[in-house]
Amino acid sequence: MTRDASRPIAAASALLPFALAALAFLLRFPHLDWGLPDVYEEATALRRAWDMAGWGPEREFDPNPRFFRYPSLVLYLHLIGNALGFAVGKATGQWASITELRAAMVADPSPIIVFARGITAVLGAATALFAYRLGRRLGGIGTGIAAALLLAVNAFHVDHSRRVEVDVPLTLFATWALWRIVLALDEPTRRRFAVAGIAVGLASSAKYPGAFLALPLAFALLRAGSARRLSAAIAAALGGALAFALTSPYVFLDFPSFAAEIGSEREHMRVGHFGLEGGISWGWYVRSLARDLAGWPVAVAAGAGVVLAVRRARTGRRSDCAPLVPGLYAIFMLAIVGSWAMKADWYLMPVLPGVLVLAVWGLRELAGLSPRLGRNPRTRRTVFVLGVLLLAAPSLTALPARLAPPPEDPRAAARRWIETNCPAGAFILAEPYGPLLVDATWRLSTEPDLWDAIGERFATRREYAIQHLPMLQVRPETSAPFYDPSLYPDVDLIITSRDISARYRREPERFANQLAFYRSLERAFTRVAEFPPDESVEPEIVVWFNPHQTRPFGYRETVLGPGLLEVPPAELSGQESEFLANLGMNYETFGFFDEAVRAYEGGARYPFPPGRQIEWKLISGLVRCRLAKGDTTGAVEMLGEAADRTSVRGNREAFLEIREKILSGDPGGPARSR
């Protein structure tokens, strides 16, 4: 073939991985607006980046995330995304200023969430590019194409690529790292191991389990040869450490906070979500990988691929050891996450591209082992294509449902029913995983310059006094004091969630208070609405009405006020002060200042969780209530005492600033309730 004739082929070969990534994006792009304007995902990376940008209440730009459940790389990506999103929104007329952008985040964050989900979709689609490169390196262009196509149509990966989360970015960097480790194994130079180390460092900075890629990296180093092993190891270690430190610097700069939060997260992994799981989870994760993530055909083929990779590696040649790299990572991840009580199928997502590559490579090797197929290339190719279709069958079967418009969430149906049938100003007590209603206390948690913009967006929505019942993931029994009906004598509506109540009903002795609370609803309240989940006869969300209330909370002349929350020191959950601060805000918002003071003072008796917000909520709430009652002297004295007493960073200066504003007659003190 002449040089001129080969150029189109070379160009097509270079563009092929990008075409596969484009296909993956086209499958992930539809329905990025699912669920909106309600946001049911945690979207932690976006929300933390929002606070870091200084767009939250009473905040300024701060590169320290002050949050270490995840490292910072994905948070910084969304921090950049926030700036780009603002520019795009301004250019398209979504908002004209930062004030309007911040108002949108409170009232209707739909365009912000769609843009953030788009970032995840792009990263998810780009993973197909590295799956292709990894597959091509191990088994040729056919293996690369098949692996990328399998990832592109994988229903599990498509679904998660439409959410704001960190596991999809981790999967991207993990797949890139596996490819770079294979390259370093094939040609063990310092430069290649340095790049592989950088990839591992970035994967670790996307989510801490990315550090488990150190095992296949160490395997590659052991195969590098004694003459260059030490220098290659130093290059890989320096590359990884530098990449992690540059993208998650506050892990080191704020190490005490990191250590404290990681300790809490370690306990969460040990006991499981909501205290629900127990013991090791290896069998569960293997079934989940085979059933939900990859499909049984892929799991079987990948298992065969591991056996064949071990068989080939016995030759001792470095190139023959390469297929073991994704296999080692998958096995190590299964061993680690399977030792946790916590069960979450997305924890295995980072191994998914490598497992798909290994399955396709194993299929190719099996076809080559057959003497009959080995002599007939055309038959071997046909069998390979049919085998790939078999591997893709579970995902192709599930994909249409992922591409179709998602069904309405029961929480959205519950929200619509409540806003239609429940008057504004009602006091609503809600368990987690319930509908997202407009909380009337938003004026107390946002700056006055946002009120007009938010008010315009909420003009057609009803606002309620909403009190959320805490859910404690590590020590769920410590939610018992909050399940005391005497705390809520003024409540109009109670919303319970099956996801919560079913957990408590599994251990009736451990959760006796919670079950007594549910029985009291059956006796004293009226079940007015139920919203079952898809394909279930059991209600997902139940709405209970208090027949003893004749007027909504916000329209009453007088109220009884909150009951007394008494929690012994040994049974503290850490949620007491925040719970009472929010309770006080509900009473204050509707003008019941004495009752609000009772809740605020109760919250001040309990320890504050880390951060400045809860102490700020309690003290500023007490000050607002004193000012509303005309007690300016008492408000000034309280701020001075709080400034002397606080140990929370930034609060002393804030309290003194508000004190000076009040003394000078400046109305810019704590935002007053309406």
Image: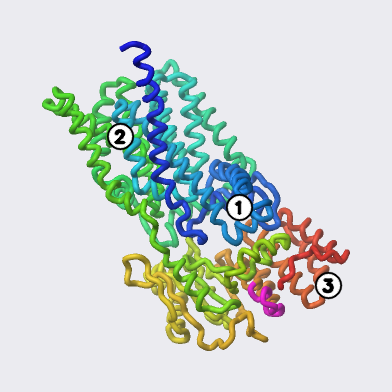
Q: Is residue 79 visible?
A: no
661 left or right of 246 in image: right
How many discs mark residues in the rendered view? 3
Q: Residue 3 in the image: state x and y as whole percent.
A: 36, 12
- Asked which secondary structure carries label 3, the reply is helix
In front of the other: 432 or 572: 432
Tell me the chief SS of the magenta region.
helix
Does residue 128 show up?
Answer: yes
- What residue range appears in magenta? 586-595
- Reading the image, the residue beneath label 3 is 632
Q: How crowded is mark 2: few (under 14 residues within 10 Å), some or many (20 or more)?
A: many
Identity of the residue drawn at 36% across and 32% down: 132
Q: Is residue 283 left or right of residue 574?
A: left
The amino acid at mark 3 is Thr
Q: Earlier in the sequence, mark 1 or mark 2?
A: 1
CA gap, disc 1 and disc 2: 41 Å
Neighbourhood count class around disc 3 (C-alpha, 10 Å): few under 14, some 14–19, many 20 upward? some
**Element under disc 1:** loop
